[in-house]
Image: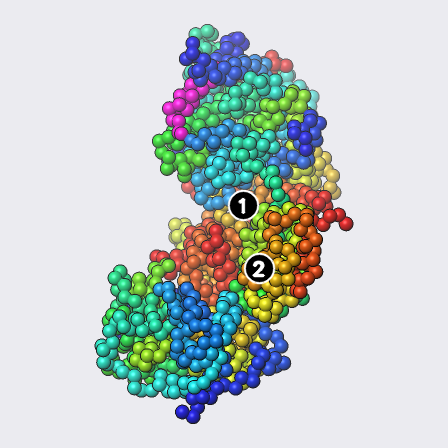
Amino acid sequence: MADSPTAFERFVQGILPENPVYRQLLGLCPTLAVTNGMKPALTMACSVAFVLLCANIVISLIRNLLKPHLRIVVFTLTIATFVTIADRFLAAYLFQMSKTLGPYIPLIIVNCLIICRCEVCASKQSVFTAASDAIGQSIGFGLALSSIAAVREILGTGMFFGIRILPEAWPDWVIMVLPPGAFLTLGLLLGLVNWLGSIKSRRAS
Amino acid sequence: MITTTLAIAAGTMLVMAVVLSFILGWANKKFKVEIDPKIEAVIDILPGVNCGGCGYLGCSDYAVAIVTDNDPVNKCTVGGEACARGLADIMGVEVGEMVKLFAVVNCGAHTSDRLKTHEYRGEKRCASAHLVAGVQGCTFGCLGFGDCVRACHYDAMHIVDGLATVDFNNCIGCGACSKVCPRSIITITGFMADKIPTVTCSNKDKAKDAKAVCKTACVGCKACTKLSDLFSITNNLSTYDHAAYTEEHYETALKAIEKCPTNCIHFIGKSLGK
Amino acid sequence: MIYLLDLMLIALTAALINNFVLYYFVGICPFVGVSRKVEMAFGMGLAVTFVISIAAFISWSITTMVLIPGAPLSSFIAGFFLPEESAAAIDLTILSYIVYIFAIASSVQFVEMYVRKFFPQLYSSFGVFLPLITTNCAILFACLTIMSHVVGVENPQDAWDLGRAITLAFFGGIGFTIAIVIMSGIREELELCDIPEPFQDAAITLIIGGILAIAFMGFTGVDSGIREALIP
Amino acid sequence: MGLFKLKGFPGTGNFRHGIHPPYNKHLSDESKVEVMDTPETVTLPLLQHLGVPCKQIVKSGQMVRYGEMVGKGEAFVSASLHSPVAGKIKKNTVVTMPNGMHLPALSIQTQGEQISPQKLWDEIRSKHWPRDCISIYDPFTIVKVIHDSGIVGLGGAAFPTHVKVTPSDTRMIDTLMVNGCECEPYLTCDYRLMKEAPRAIVAGALLTARAVSAREIVICVEDNKPDAVKSLKQATEQTVIKIAVLKTKYPQGSEKQLIKSVIGLEIPLGGLPSDVGVAMSNVGTMATVARGIIKESPLTHRVISVSGRGIKYPKNLFVPIGISIAQVIDFCGGFTKDAARVIAGGPMMGFSFSDFNTPVTKGTSGINVLTHDEIKSDQETACIRCGRCVDACPMNLVPTRLALAARYNNPSIARQYHIHACFECGCCSYVCPAKINLVQLIRTGKKLAAAS
Amino acid sequence: MPDSNKILDTSLKSGLPDVKDNPEIHVAPSPHIREIKVNTQKMMIDVLIALTPVVIVSVYLFRIYAVKQLFICTASCLTAEYIFVRMRNRPLTLKDCSAGVTGIILALSLPGSAPWFVGVIASFVAMGIGKIIFGGLGMNIFNPAMVGRAFVMIAFAGLMGAGSYENITGLVDAVSGATPLSALKFSNTPALISHLFWGNTNGSIGETSSAACLIGGLFLVFRKTASWQIPVSILLTVLVLAGITDLAGTGSGLFLMHQLFGGSLMFGAFFIATDPVTSPLTSKGKLIFGFGTGLLIIIIRLFSGYPEGVMFAVLMMNAVTPLINRWTNPQPMGEA
Amino acid sequence: MKFLRNSNLAQAWLVLVLATFFGTALAGIQVKLSPVIEANKIRETMEKIPNLVLDASQASAIKTQDLIIQSRVIEVEKNGITKFYPVYDVQLKDGTLAGHVAKAKGQGYADKIEVLLGLDAKGSTITGLFILDQKETPGLGNRILEKPWRDQFVDKSSDAALVVVKSGTGQDNEIDGISGATISSRSVTNIVNTTIADIKPQLLPASKNENTKKLNGKIKEIE
Ligand SMILES: Cc1cc2nc3c(=O)[nH]c(=O)nc-3n(C[C@H](O)[C@H](O)[C@H](O)COP(=O)(O)O)c2cc1C
Ligand SMILES: Cc1cc2nc3c(=O)[nH]c(=O)nc-3n(C[C@H](O)[C@H](O)[C@H](O)COP(=O)(O)O)c2cc1C
Ligand SMILES: Cc1cc2nc3c(=O)[nH]c(=O)nc-3n(C[C@H](O)[C@H](O)[C@H](O)COP(=O)(O)O)c2cc1C
Ligand SMILES: Cc1cc2nc3c(=O)[nH]c(=O)nc-3n(C[C@H](O)[C@H](O)[C@H](O)CO)c2cc1C
Ligand code: SF4
Ligand code: SF4
Ligand code: SF4
Ligand code: SF4
Ligand code: FES
């Protein structure tokens, strides 16, 4: 691979090859907590995308002013600010969703995914690259969240986005929308992704 | 009202920032603990997120492990490739070897070449079978239970007809296989050419005893040493000086291979295309 | 008496029934990352318990003293500029997230430096875990939970005092310790098991987490059961 | 625990855990010791004991007399080697011992006048071994003679005996325990020796006790050998020697367990019997010591049992060291049709082997040939953590952990569970329902732990 | 000295005497003899034998429902094991019968009225998530049958709850009403102790008859297939704790009897908690395990929202079993 | 000067600037958004109120703004602890008291359950029940959210305590439990019973209470 990936490569990498959840195991808490339905999962993914994008842009803008030993402080400050903004906007305009997500929106502050992207990409790259990296990673994160949420919501309630898609006779697997379901689904999907990955790499070699 | 709120909020933040940076700065000076400058340099390169993704207890723990235990530099997912490169620079971990290293199995006996073999009913691993007498007559040669195969992370070692066989396309010469072989018959060898000659035997017994246990054992007959002085015989076993090999030894090696009465000299190395 | 019972039930709930890791999914990163060895997990658990208690103290104090409307400190300062009534209405809760994260990060760092300098022995068994904790959402989560019981509660009686806040945090930390130590015990055992390749490490850890979560569901309702048993 | 006490001893006559395998001693315990004639050649590996190999001091082509030293044990933990025949040294060969060691060996072609083995055996069996007047032998001479006679423990480990009996300032010995438990199934050589030649054992024990200045002498026998107890009782009348009759249980004969049973003390981990003031020797060793000191003849012959259902006529034999096992087996009528596994030593701790040219060595206590029926074992499955191995392990270890740690190359777990305390008795493998080769894995693990 | 010169006639030049007699010598590590009375398969078959009284009672009480449940679970467990092991390319392990044991124990712990898919899902979860994912027989941390049961119990709480036990009433005349523990906990109506003991009460199909569980369980203990420490310590703990609670309450002993003979205590203590794979190795560890299980059972039964706690208690103790093993790592002889 | 340049504060100038800037920005957002959020919170309760005191047809005819809703807090002291019940008195436009709505909390199966309970003007009949917040098991306990089940409470008299039964015998004070969720059903019923018992004595003299606040005014102001 080239020394520093181009903006487009950054974008593509975030989606699958360096998927934040399945590949880098970053930000597992929200991944588990909010995936009992597609709606909260997507809301979370959008909030993360918003924060990540804003933070990446801001950091990239001020990247030349950063002092090495204070960079993490600046990252955290920036992230916390945007998280607060996202949180308040949700509370103001999507009140029910904000109630459902509860503390998991503010917990984005400590989501390593964002700080990781600031560190790896935004603090070193131009605004455009940083932004496309943010978008790529967010899409990857969103894909991960929605794959888990889809499994859990469909099996757990027979619905998708709250719309019934399985026949009424479907016995809801309540466990899927409860805490154990989150762990089991993520564990099994992670195994599946690893397995597919290993098949692919075996085929390649 | 609004301006006051704004002012107070800004003030609060400012005060907090000032107080905290002051305290921490003070503490940093006051509580300074001398550490290895190399570790410090490594800490500076690591992101400092302390996420634990590397499997260590935060960045400085990882830094210590890198410097003192020579642990791999590529474990930080947050820092990614750039970070690993920076760390490698500090550590001076260099990969550019002049000579390619490969594993060489110093045994050439496939199942049918081995004599006095007996059915073995025990743990099917070399390290264990090595402890039981009589699995096969030769006490030097490959047991073929593949401990080395399991140790290799690069899919470069396989058991072919009872004999451990290196896949030179995959082998990187890491030496994992040679560490686990209970019979110590795998050597990590520098290859001076794509293919080099070698004596695929480790049996140090006299000709009679060696012949009694293996069809392809080196019997120390000196046929090869007469042809090329890169062969030398110690303890009834011929060995080849790989480090001295150059292209011009090719012919003599080929002749030695022809002459060897037990067929235990071979050219090994990358198959050059099909 | 009733207060004590209340504390006890908060403790029980935080530690077992609504375990931080297994019910609220916070602190998953160390739960997956630092659970390979029992000693490590135990040290991590203790460090989290310690930090979470400090963080609870700090965040409770800051929230009640500075952030909420009518908090003594902020209304005192605002009192210089504004009439008393609007000074009391000044609401800084929007700063809470930033303030928490910085207060926690700094205090952890301070403690770490202090311990490292003056108690090197303690540092090697416990202090090394500290840096890992700052970015652990269990800590922030405890602060947020406490905040939700302090800010915007309708009945003044329901607002948590410092005792409840610290109980929740401390036993939340204990619950975290229980979960991570159990997990590390299991993972040590797994070193001698033949786990399918794709499931090794993170995936099997999560699946075990799922089974643990199932097991811990057995405690559902124990708090109200005990409450009923003790207050007929 | 007062209830369960061994009369006359501090111990209980029993130890924790252990197993009760089928002993099958009846196959050979009625056969008197027969004497084998001198073979045409003998092969003498230069390392027949635990420790440093002895140094060959004869040249090919040279003639040697009976009992002449052919290999000298120069190091302290080493033992000399003596020719059991008169003859001519041939070219050196190599042999692969049943325990896997690949060793250089002397080979001697029998030539000329031979000593009669029958006479040797009759000498040992005779009633004329002294019981008093031992004091004419000075302790230092005893130790020296033991050293010069190449005497090693005949109980299995073949540890040079002089090392055990050399007095030490730091470790005082007050009890000499003579190990006649013979807890291994099938083996009967010690039993026959105790029954047929108790006087030699007693003389050897008295001499050894003098060398180590032990006040007490205990001969330990399991309670499934009443005849041996009877003859020993007769032989020890009017001596200080006591006889401890112990519960029959494997591995009662192992020194740690035996000391626990009889004296109630535990040898510290990694320690020796001398740490608790005990010296222990096998009955056969005692007889050899007596012969070495009183008759001044070195260790050249020993009693072995050849047993198992895979042998036509199980026997106890008095054989020269170095005789090929093939000849021994032939002497006993050869194999039966369904013989399946040949073992040097007992079935619990012995080594199977396939090269029957291997010679009998000082440490060979028996040859067992088991049939397909006897070794039938089911398919191995994964460990089901039943804990039977834990309940069987006389060392109180967790064998399953040790074995799995070895299997998964995890030396740190192996050490955490004290892999080095295992003495490979085989109880765990014996009871394991999953039929895992625990002992072999543990042995592998020890190597692994030592290497890392 | 007539015989002093005699030298053994060595006609045997070849190493092997009479080679033709003995063609198949093989080599193996010590020890060369093994206990032939036990092996994994025999232990599992022991469990199956011990389960027969329980199966008979369940079939007698719940008729076709029991037969159906047993068939579904056993068949799906075997199928699941087959499929998953195949997916891993490992040698098939159906012969060791452990999948059968899991299937039967799982079936016996389900209500007879549970629909077919409950049994199927429970079996696949039991074998997949409970067993094969850990590496198969002997590697699992949690009792597979209980993992399967817990999964469906939570997934289909409505179908598996007390209500489902009542549905069956009227279909089978032998039993009626709610399960004894439910009835006692939620409506304070005790059952007849003799019914509890012999089994004509409602409940999961295998748990009703304490007598049958006792017979089978004692068989297991005497065969040493199951260790005695676990059932004894569980039962003792429950006896003591429930006894104290009883004395603190009415003192009539009714509560105690319900705790001991009602619900799945006997079944669990003898057949489930004793699963060697998921219980500690040492006897001290087993005693601790049993005590913990008993304690948790009582806590859950007394205070939680469930009338029964055997399953949860076993799963929780399974989880701490590695820690118990660590703490009870015996000191080798000579180390103490 | 040198001292200043090397001091921590000078090093951290970026942090200080950013902190100040972000603090100000956030406060601005707070000022802008907090009324909206407040309104959201109040509306959550307010929207339910008409349905809880009026029957369905009436409720749909009347707009929230047409009602005068006043809130107050009823304090009840029991066993030494004081309990607070927010109560909303609902008046029609013409000033007639339509009923009361009380907010109450209690332990459910898994966690606290929060309900709104509507009572008629005299407090003698239940006019409605709404579950505001619950964390019961989906598919089981959370079926208390279902309207048919909640509607069982409507028109029940507040004189006799309600009981949960498995199969009704037709008695007046009976509530059919949800099968598989008896505990949740019972919890809700208990909350209703205690609330009625606690606040009934203090319901009537409501309109003149001091801590009454006019709420719809506030909402209107926002909108
Ligand atoms: C498992 C086991 C069983 C043993 N059984 C006997 C035995 O039955 N008889 C015996 O003399 N030595 C037995 N030994 C050897 C003794 O521990 C001890 O080494 C020996 O008695 C010392 O005497 P020696 O040096 O004269 O051989 C056994 C050792 C082990 C490890
Ligand atoms: C082995 C076994 C374990 C069980 N464990 C539990 C348990 O942990 N929790 C539980 O609620 N029911 C458990 N049950 C089911 C109960 O014994 C019984 O069916 C119960 O009364 C039904 O309770 P419900 O009202 O929760 O449905 C178990 C049944 C068996 C056979
Ligand atoms: C996973 C699970 C979740 C449950 N959730 C609830 C619940 O939310 N509310 C409830 O009342 N009962 C719940 N229960 C059922 C109770 O354990 C208990 O069996 C039930 O309340 C008995 O009620 P019934 O008599 O109406 O069947 C749940 C059971 C399980 C297994
Ligand atoms: C005494 C005994 C009890 C057992 N109990 C169970 C059980 O409760 N559940 C189960 O799935 N398997 C049980 N098994 C079978 C087997 O051990 C189990 O499937 C393993 O956990 C699979 O690795 C039992 C086996 C024995 C010998
Ligand atoms: S080379 Fe060594 S490790 Fe590999 S199969 Fe042969 S004996 Fe085993
Ligand atoms: S282990 Fe390393 S040296 Fe050995 S074959 Fe594999 S890559 Fe080559
Ligand atoms: S072989 Fe070792 S582990 Fe096994 S029983 Fe004997 S001493 Fe214990
Ligand atoms: S006896 Fe065998 S199956 Fe049982 S625990 Fe030991 S190794 Fe495992
Ligand atoms: S996201 Fe919660 S601890 Fe990492």
- Would residue D207 be found to the left or right of residue E190 on screen? left
Q: Secondary structure at mark 1?
A: helix
Q: Indicate which label's residue lies in the foreground, 1 or 2.
A: 2
Q: Residues within 10 Å of mark 1 (few under 14, many from 20)?
A: many
Q: Secondary structure at mark 2?
A: strand
Real-space Cα distance between discs 1 and 2? Answer: 64 Å
In x, y percent, where is residue D203? 29, 79
Mark 2: amino acid: Ile
Q: Residue furthest right?
A: B274
Mark 1: amino acid: Leu
Using the rendered view, name the quadrant where residue E56 is placed: bottom right
Nearer the observer, B130 or E44: B130
Query: How was the colour assigned to the protein in this rendering?
Result: rainbow
- Residue D4 to residue F178: above or below: below
Q: Residue furthest front?
A: B226
Does the magenta portion include E166?
no
Can the viewer see residue A99 in this picture?
no
Extent of the magenta region? B13-34
Q: Which residue is mark 1?
A: C212
Residue at 61% x, 20% y: name it. A60
Query: In the rendering, which numbered label is found on residue B233?
Result: 2
